[in-house]
Amino acid sequence: MYQLTFSFEAFLAEFWQKKPTIIKGGFNKFTDPISPDELAGLAMEEEVDSRYIAKHGNEWEVKHGPLTFDNVPKDNWSFVVQAANHWHEGAASLVTPFRQLPNWLFDDLMISYSTPGGGVGPHIDQYDVFIVQGSGKRRWRVGPQKEDYEEKHGHPALRQIKDFEPILDDVLEPGDILYIPPGFPHDGYAIETAMSFSIGFRSPKKQELLSSFADYVIANEVGDVHYHNPDLPARKTPGAIMASERADMEAMMRSLLDHPEMIKQWMGEHLSQNRHELDIIAADPPWQAAEVYQFLESGEVLKRLGGLRAFYYPEQPHQLFINGESYQLPEECGTAATYLCDAETISQDKLGKLIDHPAFIALLTQLINYGYWYPVE
């Protein structure tokens, strides 16, 4: 079990989305949760999002997975696997200490393997990231946040910038953590063969929210009403859009937001959708509710699928949003949300009397059959 050596509350107060920092020994006696061979095996899979990045002098090479590792150079190359927490339980355990942040902000765990000199060059990301140094050593430089960094066209897939004056410059060793807020340029390269683990948190953009909400409105045929003005006067300037007409149409658009329950429904579904592929294996044969009940009653444990997004509103805990879909339970099952969305495992000890509620067992059976929860071996 990975445990942080520092106060997360103090970290949030001083650094979160304010300034980058290096936390030496953020994990004590850190060991990699996945081996380089296991990571390479994931990178070879069709379903897994991976990249190979190499530097040849001043030239950059990028390949997208599935990868092969034939004829790779000795040094100056890396490969990365996105959403590794979806595919490897050991790697997923590294995310748990960071669950003190909202799950709806969490994006994925990216793991990189780098030979000496391997990196992706200076660049800027628009998300918060905790980079945990695994085996080996890696030098990191982080620059100040400003708007006029010049792009460097090393490779279209890398979106690099030209160099910067660092405000942080240090070598990370196993267990050290580098935190970088959005908009701060950074550059890291391996001093020796190294593994790095990046826990990324990605907040939605205004554009994404507006686009997703518009899609929801259209899909649900909300606001399918034309503009009407029965008091329309004649005019001598037919090319003009009058201020009153513009205001009426603005009011039509704003009225779509005047539906708080609809907004909550859309937002729950939107935030629970995953940007990355999930390792979903549907139950075959399907479980029956009686089997689920007996399984839990016998003391066995169910685990939530790695990377599955499951949320609820505290004021409506009987409604759950899981992987982009909404699920409803009777109000007397209100505590179900805390087990299905807050906890990573389910057992009789945790559930208490909820295990005897048929509606909860029926929903849990459905989710097991979807492959969203599975038995712990």
Image: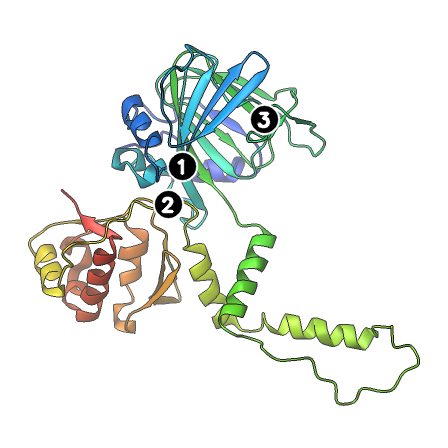
Quadrant in the picture for residue 279? top left
Image x and y of residue 86, in percent: 32, 41
Give the x, y percent position of residue 120. Answer: 52, 23
Secondary structure under the numbered disc 2 in the rendered image? loop
Q: Quadrant of residue 377?
A: top left
Label 3 secondary element: loop
Q: Position of residue 292 (x, y in %)?
A: 13, 59
The residue at the point 51 percent across, 71 percent down is 260
Label 2 Cα crowd, 10 Å radius (few <14 / some 14-19 / many 20+): some
Q: Which one is in front, 240 or 193?
A: 240
Instruction: Give the residue pinned by disc 2.
Output: 277
Q: Amino acid at mark 2?
A: Glu
Dots 1, 2 in contact, CB < 8 A: yes
The residue sitting at the bottom extreme is 230
Q: CA distance from mark 3 to mark 2?
A: 26 Å
Badge 1 is on which residue? Answer: 49
At x 64%, y 28%, the residue is 144
Q: State the CA–CA distance, disc 1 to disc 3.
A: 19 Å
- The image shows residue 237, relative to residue 169, as above or below, that is below
Vertical side of 36 occupied by 277: above or below: below
